[in-house]
């Protein structure tokens, strides 16, 4: 049986330096923090060597008493998960002979001990297949033999494949002459492990080193490839919160759980993703042409349990990054390490329940899974009820030199939202902290996608192609200003303020493909690579935005009605050159051509000299021009724009575990179709970033320790600033950000800790004033303790309870607000605790553990919600309430488990 | 919680050390607001000769101010007033009402403080309404004035009790522009030129000069409602030229009748 091994890590470790040098350099790093990601300066970039797990203790299975009468022979294959400690942490039957043979085999397999598999000398988790062959015992069976400890047979370097490493490690072991009695012979196999040959006193097994695809070559200190690992236990409501594992992330949400989170990344108010290129498994999430924000990215359709890894590049430093990669990019890698079926039901306060079903077919790759989620909540405070359903399924297989993957996803959600409150109304007691002005606010969204990927390797050429199709309906209803914007126009009938509730509808269809060809060659005794890739995407988007009358909910004005056909084709070339083992030069250039074909179906909204015979009245979209001359209310505009974006990174090291890098890159955000005019040059927002950083990564005893710090500067020529009155982003002037980010991760056999800290100074170029809403300081800590509970009395039939205690803590310093003010700080802690045994696990999750009453978002602008006798027209403080403490209890059961 | 607050404070101090002394510019401010008659008023009657030659003596002059606002918008001669909430940024507001004795030079405080931003204001607005500025029906007496006007031997004892409601509604004559004259436009005295920047702790003073109200009024056109003693009463409608003159050229005059000034905090 040929089983693959995909490498888990690109950590490259060299000989240990003298400790005083280490200490001195770490001290010099100063604020250098522990990194939550593998080191990014691997000297060879090629796949690191894998070492198969080696059996240290083999325990034979006992021929079951219940089968003695039949004296039948049986064969059971057990799939065992070997932890980094060498212990078998999970077992499952992959080839059954029925009970009681399966039980006997599982019991024996649990007692095996291994020298763990290694990647570049670092222990990694692996899976081992152990075949047991049961022979009927002799009439006078001997007592079972004690465990044997065979010598360890080192494995050679595994073959390399597809940018990852596939390996089959079959080790000869069990050379003890100790008889196995009653002998359930451990099946012997040849090195390939594919031809079982019954025999005695020999054991053979095949292994699968579990893990992920080798990530693309790092682009320096700003390139974070995060394996979620044990930190998946940290409470996270959605996939966006996984982003907090990288520095500088703040998430807010003035909408609802069906509304994209507002993402702040390293000094960027990226709004709902407009300045970050989001993707999942290579499939774009950003919605081109979305009227709420060009590049709007709602990640709520991603189940956080399926996020195996996350790659965030904080800046435009990789030629693969495309449109919207102004602040950077984030790519979610899906996977489910748990095999079998897991059912989980959670319920808690605010009428919240969640049902989750995860399925990882046994024997299939981690990239093969299916998951279903149902969620409903009454929500805290007023008007925060909602419900959603999510289905995600993916099949990943390999055939010869071809890897293929098919992913399907469907998601629907409907939530109400409370929106923002005026601080003065809350302080005066007119409104409660969790109340709402307008109960008509909310969102109804969906997302349906299908993608396929094919990757092939021919000698030193790796070729990958991916196609995808996405359908995305969305409706948002938001009211930021109350009764302020419905001004009386001379052509309108007399009216009072009817309400500012925005009703935005969007329906987007996307077809796209991306791919690359990567050629590798050994030159100068180093692996050199060149990659040529493409990105193609077409979007057909229909958007409209109306204002709804507060009293009736009827639309009284059309603000926009756009139908957009958008195209984006990008080409890039990327070099990964290593002239010397400690020097890597990575980079290239990317060019994108954007096309816009925008039909404005409400192009005429006012006329200076309207017809007296046919006055426009209250209609929003007019069919006349001056003096009543007829015209269609539509206007089509087409234009194109192109951008060429060079990107490069120079990486030195690692020496003594320390690497240094400097990166430069340019990125663009395509223009909102709202601003398109015929043949006018497309005004891109263009960003230039430079980043320099240091990292340190080593294994110190049983602990993996990594530190990273980086300094950056980014300049954007046309930034986006959110306008509460328009309900959308508006173009602003140039901005510059200077700052530093540090990250850290410490991982051991029973703990996993990650922390990061970011400081940024973001200013407008013309005035030198701070950019509002961007936090100066963001601190985040994630920690998880896990393992078997140590208390003997808690064991049941010798089986220990396993437990997890995980916490996440976020601190955001007071953010600058317009009018020279600062927001309140945010400090919130979440906690998750689970206890499990056998197939079962119970847990409790507390978000906002200390029930801190905090303001998630704070803004200064003018609004009038009618809370005072006369209109309130000057900028006032508004906020969206952070969630109070929520406690969810969960129960889960795992069937056919193992990894 | 005390420890948490201290911890927050410590972190904030650290943050400030790294640059939070920078700002987004401007500031939100709170300030006192008062209204008064002209500075040369004595607290009793005001006498003057109007532009039409009347010797006018005002013995009662009260103005009901619903709210007042300051705007960054620069008044433009001939600019068409459209909506009641103007474009541009409002820098100050007082959303409480006050009935002002316009014969008193003493500052009469509004019941609530004003609020705004520390930004230069170029135009002021007085909202002369008893409630919703868009509601047509409103019986609040906005102007309550009395006095005498003399032209030669003719004496006109007068009084004016003006409301702004349906009586001031101006129907649109052009079907293409049915919304040209919303009632709020009758109630808002807008684009009163000013030049001040609100600051925290200061006082915004609105001075009202009732002499300007009657400056262009031809009292001979005011209806006589009583013979003995004689009394002329403004009709409180748009159907009388004297009333229109009082209302449009006097009470709603952009210049002369009202002025804003700023008194810094002491």
Image: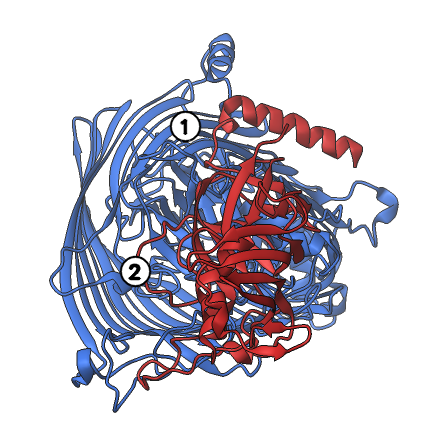
Chain colours: A blue, B red
Residue drawn where x is 51% and y is 59% of the image: B213
Residue drawn where x is 55% and y is 55% of the image: B210
Can residue A144 be seen?
A: no
Label 1 marks which chain's residue? A
Tell me, for residue B78, which label it has, or none.
2
Q: Residue furthest top?
A: A20
Q: Residues within 10 Å of mark 1 (few under 14, many from 20)?
A: many
Label 2 marks which chain's residue? B
Q: Residue furthest right?
A: A793
The image shows residue A51 at horizontal and vertical percentages of 44, 38
SS class of the residue under badge 1?
strand
In-image side of A578 versus A325 (left or right): left
The image shows residue A50 at horizontal and vertical percentages of 41, 39
In-image side of A669 versus A314 (left or right): left
Q: Which residue is mark 1?
A: A710
Query: In the picture shown, does residue B216 fall above or below B47?
Result: below
| Circles 2 and 1: CB atoms closer than 8 Å | no
Query: In the picture shown, does residue A603 fall above or below A876?
Result: below
Residue drawn where x is 55% and y is 83% of the image: A552
Measure the C-alpha gap from mark 2 to mark 1: 58 Å
């Amino acid at each position: 049986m040929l089983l693959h091994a995909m490498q888990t890590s690109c950590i490259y470790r060299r000989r240990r330096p003298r400790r005083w040098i280490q200490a001195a350099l770490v001290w010099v790093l100063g604020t250098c923090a522990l990194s939550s990601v593998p080191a990014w300066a691997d000297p060879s970039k090629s796949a690191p060597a894998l070492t198969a797990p080696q059996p240290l203790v083999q325990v034979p299975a006992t021929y079951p008493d219940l089968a003695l009468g039949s004296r039948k022979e049986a064969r059971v294959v057990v799939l065992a998960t070997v932890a980094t400690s060498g212990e078998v942490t999970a077992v499952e039957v992959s080839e059954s002979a029925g009970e009681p043979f399966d039980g006997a085999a599982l019991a024996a397999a649990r007692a095996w001990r291994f020298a763990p598999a290694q990647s570049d000398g670092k222990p990694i988790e692996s899976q081992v297949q152990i075949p047991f062959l049961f022979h009927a015992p002799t009439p006078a069976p001997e007592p079972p033999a004690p465990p044997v400890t065979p010598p360890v047979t080192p494995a050679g370097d595994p073959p390399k494949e597809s940018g990852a490493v596939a390996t089959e490690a079959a080790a000869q072991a069990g050379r003890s002459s100790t008889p196995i009695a009653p002998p359930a012979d451990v099946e012997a196999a040849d090195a390939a492990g594919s031809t079982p040959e019954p025999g005695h006193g020999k054991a053979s097994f095949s292994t699968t080193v579990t893990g992920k695809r080798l990530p693309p070559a790092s682009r320096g200190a700003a390139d974070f490839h995060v394996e979620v690992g044990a930190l998946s236990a940290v409470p996270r409501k959605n996939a966006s919160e996984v982003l907090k594992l990288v520095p500088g992330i703040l998430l807010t949400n003035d909408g609802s759980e069906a509304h994209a989170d507002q993402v702040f990344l390293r000094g960027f108010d990226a709004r709902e993703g407009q300045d970050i290129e989001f993707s999942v498994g290579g499939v774009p999430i950003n919605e081109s042409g979305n009227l709420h924000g060009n590049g709007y990215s709602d990640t709520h359709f991603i189940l956080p349990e399926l996020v195996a890894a996350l790659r965030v590049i904080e800046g435009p430093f990789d030629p693969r990054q495309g449109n919207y990669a102004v602040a950077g990019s984030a790519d979610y890698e899906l996977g489910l390490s748990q095999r079998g079926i897991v059912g989980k039901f959670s319920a808690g306060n605010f009428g919240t329940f969640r049902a989750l079903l995860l399925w990882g077919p046994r024997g299939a790759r981690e990239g093969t899974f299916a998951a279903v989620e149902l969620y409903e909540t009454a929500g805290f405070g007023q008007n925060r009820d909602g419900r959603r359903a999510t289905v995600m399924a993916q099949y990943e297989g390999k055939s010869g030199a071809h890897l293929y993957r098919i992913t399907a996803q469907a998601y629907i959600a409907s939530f109400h939202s409370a929106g923002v409150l005026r601080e003065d109304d809350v302080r005066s007691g007119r409104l409660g902290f969790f109340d709402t002005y307008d109960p008509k606010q909310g969102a109804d969204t969906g997302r349906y996608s299908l993608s396929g990927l094919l990757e092939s390797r021919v000698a030193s050429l790796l070729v990958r192609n991916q196609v995808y199709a996405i359908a995305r309906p969305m409706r948002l209803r938001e009211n930021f200003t109350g009764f302020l914007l419905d001004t009386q126009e001379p052509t309108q009938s007399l009216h009072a303020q009817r309400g500012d509730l925005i009703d935005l509808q969007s329906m987007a269809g996307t077809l796209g493909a991306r791919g690359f060809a990567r050629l590798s060659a050994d030159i100068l005794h180093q692996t050199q690579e060149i990659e040529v890739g493409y990105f193609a995407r077409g979007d057909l988007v229909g958007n409209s935005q109306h204002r709804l009358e507060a009293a009736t909910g009827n639309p009284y004005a059309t603000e926009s009605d756009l139908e957009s056909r958008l195209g984006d084709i990008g080409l890039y070339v990327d070099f990964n050159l290593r002239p010397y083992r400690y020097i890597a030069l990575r980079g290239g250039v990317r060019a994108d051509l954007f096309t816009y074909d925008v039909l404005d179906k409400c192009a005429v909204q006012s006329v200076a000299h309207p017809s007296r015979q046919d006055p426009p009245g209250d209609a929003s979209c007019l069919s006349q021009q001056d003096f009543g001359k007829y015209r269609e209310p539509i206007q089509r505009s087409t234009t194109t724009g192109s951008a060429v974006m060079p990107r490069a990174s120079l990486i030195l090291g690692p020496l003594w575990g320390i690497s240094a890098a400097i990166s430069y890159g340019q990125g663009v955000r395509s223009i909102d179709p709202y601003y398109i005019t015929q043949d006018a040059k497309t005004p891109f927002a263009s960003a230039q970033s430079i980043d320099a950083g240091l990292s340190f990564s080593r294994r110190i005893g049983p602990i993996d320790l990594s530190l990273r710090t980086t300094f950056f500067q980014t300049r954007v020529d046309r930034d986006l600033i959110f306008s509460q009155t328009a309900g959308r982003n508006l173009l602003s002037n140039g901005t510059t950000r200077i700052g530093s980010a540090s990250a850290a991760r410490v991982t051991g056999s029973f703990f996993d800790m990650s922390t990061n800290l970011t400081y940024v100074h973001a200013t407008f170029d013309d005035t030198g004033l701070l950019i509002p809403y961007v936090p100066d300081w963001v601190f985040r800590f994630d920690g998880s303790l896990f393992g078997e509970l140590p208390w003997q009395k808690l064991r049941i039939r010798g089986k220990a309870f396993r437990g997890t205690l995980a916490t996440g803590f976020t601190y955001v310093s007071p953010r600058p607000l317009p009018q020279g003010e600062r927001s309140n700080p945010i400090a919130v802690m979440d906690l998750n605790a689970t206890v499990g045994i056998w197939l079962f696990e119970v847990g409790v999750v507390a978000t906002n553990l200390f029930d801190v009453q905090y303001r998630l978002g704070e803004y200064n602008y003018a609004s009038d919600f009618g809370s005072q006798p006369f209109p309130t027209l000057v900028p006032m403080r508004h906020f969206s309430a952070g969630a109070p403490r929520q406690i969810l209890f969960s129960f889960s059961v795992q069937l056919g488990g193992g990894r | 919680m005390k420890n948490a607050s201290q911890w927050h404070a410590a972190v904030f101090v650290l943050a400030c050390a790294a640059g939070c002394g920078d700002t987004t510019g401007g500031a939100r401010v709170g300030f006192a607001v008062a209204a008064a008659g002209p500075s040369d008023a004595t607290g009793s009657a005001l006498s003057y000769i109007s532009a039409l030659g009347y010797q006018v003596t005002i013995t009662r002059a009260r103005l009901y101010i619903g709210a007042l606002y300051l705007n960054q918008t620069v008044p433009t001669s001939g600019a068409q007033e459209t909506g009641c909430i103007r474009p541009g940024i409002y820098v100050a507001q007082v959303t409480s009402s006050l009935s002002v004795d316009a014969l008193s030079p003493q500052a009469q405080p509004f019941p609530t403080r004003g609020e705004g931003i520390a930004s230069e204001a170029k135009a002021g607005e007085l909202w002369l309404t008893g409630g919703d500025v868009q509601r047509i029906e409103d019986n609040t007496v906005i102007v309550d004035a009395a006095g005498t006007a003399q032209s030669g031997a003719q004496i006109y004892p007068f009084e004016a009790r003006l409301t702004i409601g349906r009586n001031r509604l101006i129907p649109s004559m052009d079907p293409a522009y049915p919304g040209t004259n919303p009632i709020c436009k009758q109630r808002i005295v807008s684009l009163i030129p000013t030049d001040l920047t609100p600051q925290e702790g200061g006082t915004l003073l609105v001075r009202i000069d009732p002499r300007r109200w009657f400056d262009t009024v031809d009292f001979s056109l005011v209806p006589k409602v009583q013979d003995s003693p004689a009394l002329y009463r403004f009709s409180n409608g748009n159907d009388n030229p004297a009333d229109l003159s009082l209302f449009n050229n006097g009470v709603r005059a952009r210049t002369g009748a009202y002025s804003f000034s700023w008194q810094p905090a002491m």
